[in-house]
């Protein structure tokens, strides 16, 4: 077997461009995919134009609220690109430099203030989107909706807090400033106390009955307004979230991205190399000569898998070492990395052998390997809940039949202690190694035809 | 080598129908016949590549070398690397010595470092045959060895193959479409048509058979006489 291995490495050495592409292409794709996944949910860039005059304040009644910093809060959640005009905002969106543009018009605060007048108008903000594709459109809409919900929440909380203060004045009394003058407010509690003290001095009759009526009213109003205060504060966020994590396998996003990149690389290098080198035996008409007593079919398959595994292991480890320069990895788990790469590589190798045995020419087999590996890899990255349950079940079944998903789980589990169970992924891979090995052995019978 | 009652079926089609063949040491046997006659099937059964549905192949003294119609070698390796690889896979005690011997035999010693893909079809075929000879077989099976070669390359090839039979006593069984080539180099001819062995004998004996069965073609060239013979036998 070692002579065949040496021969395949010699052939690989003689095809430098092919060898370079075989390694460089998947590594490039893997790194791009990996970092696209890890970087995209970070702060999106949004062009921000605030036309609201800096001295404008939201008023509750006759009281002006202090600056509640809506724009600062928005810019905490997105990377705000400050622009000076609508035209500049539109151009930023059109060029794709930003995901969207958010414009707070000059009359926004006036419109908010009009809500407490007899002639309210609806406060509006402007959003400029570039819906060049449906996926982006959906993403941008979700982001903007989320931002505006946050902004509304901030304002509602502030209004609720100010409303609560007024309620306190009505209940307990105190001082209230209006147009530069301070007014003393008696409050329901004090009114009731004064009237209760005054009551015994009144003779029985109509006047005393009227005082009793007022005392009853103040008591009733106080009790009800006592309940209204907490209700008002809850109005801004009536539903609280109590989050419980069921599946605790959540490694950092960067680690997951590196796992995706490494598994992508391993999959493409091993599947293409094994499938291609096996098909080459037939393309060169050497298969029949080899298996005429020189090498058994099983040994030939094993040699191809070992070849793919060796090259895949080398490339994947080099890639991980390179990525470790940017993202800290747990080098103490290196042994587990090796286990995950070897198990994943062997499964990809077995799958590659089955694909290689199905075709007659290297080019056709390479194309087949791409056509199978790429979509399966992408399907394996679809998270649960992203699709309807029936479709997701189908995808789950399809991806379980190919080694990418368990190899990704094994890689994530090996790279980070918070990753999925390594043992379960290795068990899955072992089953696939046996299944694809048998399939490849069966398919090799077709190779016998001269 | 001896084969008796060989039958091979592919689905409903019978590729071989009870073919017998017996060869002696140093014999050059040409298997001829129209397309689909069963020539390659017979050779692949004799080579052990495929198994007959009926009949048996007697073990030859020594090994059987097989040279497929299309060169079975690695075009991205050099001449020497190809020979060394197969010598090692055949577990030769001294693969380098075996390789040198084949390079001398094929006259390719000076081109040992060349990548096979850059060699002419004729030279590729010589390496193909050299690989088949590495095991020093007592029987060499050649499937249409001269296909795609120019006349000069063909002449060199047959000179080389004839010398194997005459000098080393190697039995050579080859299939060919070229009737003139079969007449010239085959000491014995086995005529196959639709999987059936129609004739087994020398070129002179085949001409005699034509004289008996299709006298109008007996004095024509060998190819015309052969076609008339097939036609007379219903093929």
Image (cartoon, coloured by chain):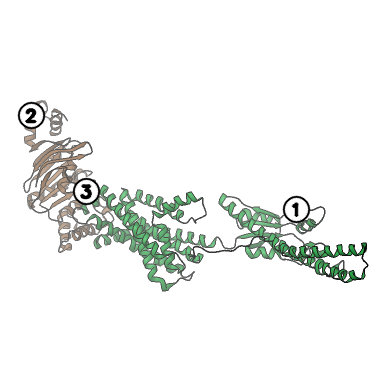
Chain colours: A green, B brown
Where residue A443 appears, as percent x and y from the top left, is 29, 49
Residue that badge 1 annotates: A122
- Tell me the SS state at disc 3: helix
Q: Residue at x 22, y 59 (%)?
A: B85
Tell me the distance, in whole angstroms, between the alpha carbons under discs 1 and 3: 89 Å
Q: Earlier in the sequence, mark 3 or mark 2?
A: 3
Please state if A277 lies on the left or on the right of A237 as rendered. left
Is A334 situated above or below A113?
below
Callout in the foreground (1, 3): 1
Q: Which residue is at the front of the view, A368 or B192?
A: A368
Residue that badge 3 annotates: B122
Residue at the farthest front position: A204
Please state if A34 lies on the left or on the right of B1 as rendered. right
Where residue A317 appears, as percent x and y from the top left, is 39, 67
Instruction: Report in which chain the residue with disc 1 lies.
Output: A
Where residue A145 appears, as percent x and y from the top left, is 64, 56
Instruction: Report in which chain the residue with disc 3 lies.
Output: B
Question: On the same chain: label 3 and label 2?
Answer: yes
């Amino acid at each position: 077997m070692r002579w065949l291995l040496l021969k395949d490495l010699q052939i690989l050495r003689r095809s430098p461009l092919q060898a370079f592409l075989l390694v460089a292409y998947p590594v490039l794709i893997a790194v791009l995919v990996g970092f696209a996944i890890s970087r995209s949910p970070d702060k999106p860039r949004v062009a921000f134009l605030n036309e609201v005059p800096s001295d404008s304040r939201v008023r509750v009644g006759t009281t002006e609220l202090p600056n509640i910093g809506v724009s600062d809060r928005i810019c905490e959640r997105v990377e705000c690109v400050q622009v000076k005009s609508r035209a500049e905002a539109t151009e930023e969106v059109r060029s794709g430099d930003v995901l969207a543009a958010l414009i707070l018009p000059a009359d926004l605060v006036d419109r908010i203030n009009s809500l407490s007048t007899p002639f309210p108008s609806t406060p509006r903000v402007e959003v400029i989107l570039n819906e060049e594709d449906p996926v982006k459109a959906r993403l941008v809409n979700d982001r903007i909706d989320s931002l505006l919900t946050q902004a509304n929440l901030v304002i509602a909380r502030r209004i609720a807090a100010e409303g609560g203060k007024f309620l306190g004045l009505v209940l307990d009394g105190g001082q209230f400033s209006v147009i530069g003058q301070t007014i003393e407010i008696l409050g329901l509690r004090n009114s009731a106390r004064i009237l209760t003290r005054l009551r015994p001095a009144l003779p029985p009759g109509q006047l005393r009955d009227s005082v009793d009526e007022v005392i009853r009213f103040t008591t009733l109003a106080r009790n009800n307004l006592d309940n209204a205060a907490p209700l008002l504060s809850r109005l801004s966020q009536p539903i609280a979230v109590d989050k419980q994590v069921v599946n605790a396998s959540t490694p950092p996003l960067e680690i997951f991205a590196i796992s995706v990149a490494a598994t992508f690389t391993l999959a493409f290098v091993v599947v293409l190399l094994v499938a291609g080198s096996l098909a080459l035996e037939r393309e060169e008409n050497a298969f029949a000569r080899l298996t005429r007593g020189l090498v058994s079919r099983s040994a030939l398959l094993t040699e191809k898998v070992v070849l793919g595994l060796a090259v895949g292991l080398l490339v994947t480890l080099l890639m991980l070492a390179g990525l470790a320069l940017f993202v800290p990895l747990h080098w103490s788990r290196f042994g587990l990395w090796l286990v995950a790469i070897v198990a994943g590589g062997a499964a990809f190798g077995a799958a590659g052998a089955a694909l290689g045995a199905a075709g007659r020419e290297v080019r056709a087999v390479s194309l087949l390997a791409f056509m199978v590996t790429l979509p399966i890899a992408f399907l394996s990255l679809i998270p649960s809940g992203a699709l309807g349950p029936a479709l997701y079940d189908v995808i789950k079944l399809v991806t379980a039949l190919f080694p990418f998903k368990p190899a990704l789980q094994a890689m994530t589990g090996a790279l980070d202690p918070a990753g999925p169970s390594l043992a379960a992924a290795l068990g899955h891979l072992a089953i696939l190694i046996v299944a694809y090995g048998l399939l490849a052995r069966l398919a090799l019978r077709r190779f016998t035809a001269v | 080598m001896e084969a008796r009652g060989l039958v091979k079926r592919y689905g409903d089609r019978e590729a071989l129908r009870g073919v017998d063949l017996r060869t002696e040491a140093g014999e050059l046997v040409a298997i001829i016949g129209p397309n689909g006659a069963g020539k390659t099937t017979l050779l692949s059964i004799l080579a052990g590549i495929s198994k007959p549905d009926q009949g048996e192949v007697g073990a030859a003294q020594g090994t059987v070398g097989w040279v497929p119609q299309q060169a079975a070698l690695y075009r991205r390796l050099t001449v020497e690397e190809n020979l060394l690889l197969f010598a090692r896979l055949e577990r030769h005690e001294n693969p380098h010595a075996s390789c040198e011997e084949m390079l001398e035999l094929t006259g390719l010693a000076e081109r040992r470092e060349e990548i096979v893909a850059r060699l002419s079809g004729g030279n590729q075929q010589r390496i193909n045959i050299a690989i088949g000879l590495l095991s020093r077989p007592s029987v060499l099976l050649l499937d249409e060895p001269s296909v795609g070669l120019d006349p000069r390359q063909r002449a060199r090839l047959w000179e080389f193959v004839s010398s194997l039979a005459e000098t080393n006593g190697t039995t050579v069984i080859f299939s060919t479409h070229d009737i003139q080539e079969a007449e010239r180099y085959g000491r014995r001819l086995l005529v196959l048509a639709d999987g059936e062995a129609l004739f087994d004998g020398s070129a002179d004996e085949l001409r005699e058979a034509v004289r008996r069965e299709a006298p109008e073609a007996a004095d024509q060239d060998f190819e015309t006489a052969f076609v008339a013979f097939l036609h007379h036998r219903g093929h």
